[in-house]
Amino acid sequence: MNAKTAIRAAALAGTALLAFAGTAAAVDWRGWNIHPEGYPNTVAMKQFADEVTEKTDGRVTATVYDSAVLGDQPDAIEQTRNGALDFGNFNLGPMGPIIPVTNVVSLPFLFKDVQHMYRVMDGEIGAQFSEGMEEYGLVSLAWYDSGSRSFYNAKRPIANPEDVKGLKIRVMNNDLYVGMVGELGGNATPMAFGEVYQSLKTGVIDGAENNYASFDSTGHYEVARYYSITDHLIIPECVCIAKSSWDALSPEDQEIVRQAAIRSAETQRKLFTEQVMASRSEVEEAGVTINEVEDKAAFQKAMEPIYAAFIEENPDLEPMIKAIKETE
């Protein structure tokens, strides 16, 4: 082989190697979503996945699996932390037992309203949450709105803490929620979201707590005819990427994914606000009894032991709680 032939062969081999490397770099991402088709989060997550796929020119092909078909939320969080799933839309509530800093947003009556939550999470405090989550394998890129959560049940309206006494209330899997219901005299029952409808229907539980949109979209209003507006929890949700999947991206693709997440959050918040209004009208028309709890101070006072115990166990998080409450 002469020198010219050798150079040509080396060039062809190099071209083939680059082509192979380009192919090998392309990845398929699987994403988790608890919500059904048409729900604001589902629409926003599909937007996110489509934009990532398009703008990375197929270097990342992202697919979202809806309705928790890849597992319950706590399992999906663990799968994403471990890299078995690549991304997901997660509520910070079930993260609390795993990622200590996220438990702060599970303190009842922490946020004044949803707009207050936006201001907190879109600023410096939100960045602190992201830093804490990354230490546990999750890269949070944007914050979704999950509304304000209130109690609903099949027995009676709730106007004061005494009305919760004796009720079996489904909560997400977090000791703070168990304690919250317990301080009100109820019996908290951690349970997978997909089991709630049948459990309400059969009387395994008396009630649950969630936002209007979920109360409507799940059909829970069909079997729990009393919705009492306590607004006791406003828990942000994240668009989270597995750190292993994130670290494998080039800086260019990381920025594409980040911006896609931010834009999806803008879509989700808009659609969710519209959905909440539509869902309230829907359940009212269906004959659900809705009552506004006028004396929330009584509920807030009942939560004082929850705050005291939390701060005693997590003294390093007290400044964050104070900063959130002082955010205008």
Image: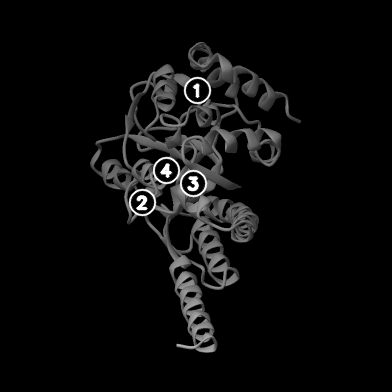
Marks 4,3: beta carbons within 8 A: yes
Tell me whether the residue at label 3 lies in contact with that at label 1, contact meaning CB atoms closer than 8 angstroms: no
Label 2: which residue? 84
Q: Quadrant of the C terminus?
A: top right
Disc 4/disc 3 C-alpha distance (Å): 7 Å
Tell me which amino acid carries mark 2: Ala
Q: Position of residue 127 (x, y in %)?
A: 65, 37
Residue sitting at x 55%, y 31%: 105
Mark 3 to mark 2: distance in Å? 11 Å
The Cα–Cα distance between marks 3 and 1, rounded to whole angstroms, is 44 Å
Say which element carries label 4. Answer: helix
Q: Quadrant of the N terminus?
A: bottom left
The first of marks 4 and 3 along the sequence is: 4
Circle 1 crowding by C-alpha within 10 Å: few under 14, some 14–19, many from 20: some
Q: Nearer the viewer, mark 1 or mark 4?
A: 4
Which mark is first along the chain, 1 or 3?
1
Looking at the image, residue 261 lies above or below residue 292: below
Of the numbered discs 3 and 2, the one sitting upstream in the chain is 2
- Where is residue 263 shown, x and y percent of the image? 65, 58
Residue with the mark numbered 1: 160
Q: Residues within 10 Å of mark 3 (few under 14, many from 20)?
A: many
Secondary structure beneath label 3: helix
Q: Residue at left 44%, top 23%?
A: 180
The residue that disc 3 covers is 243
Identify the mark nearer the N-term, 1 or 4.
4
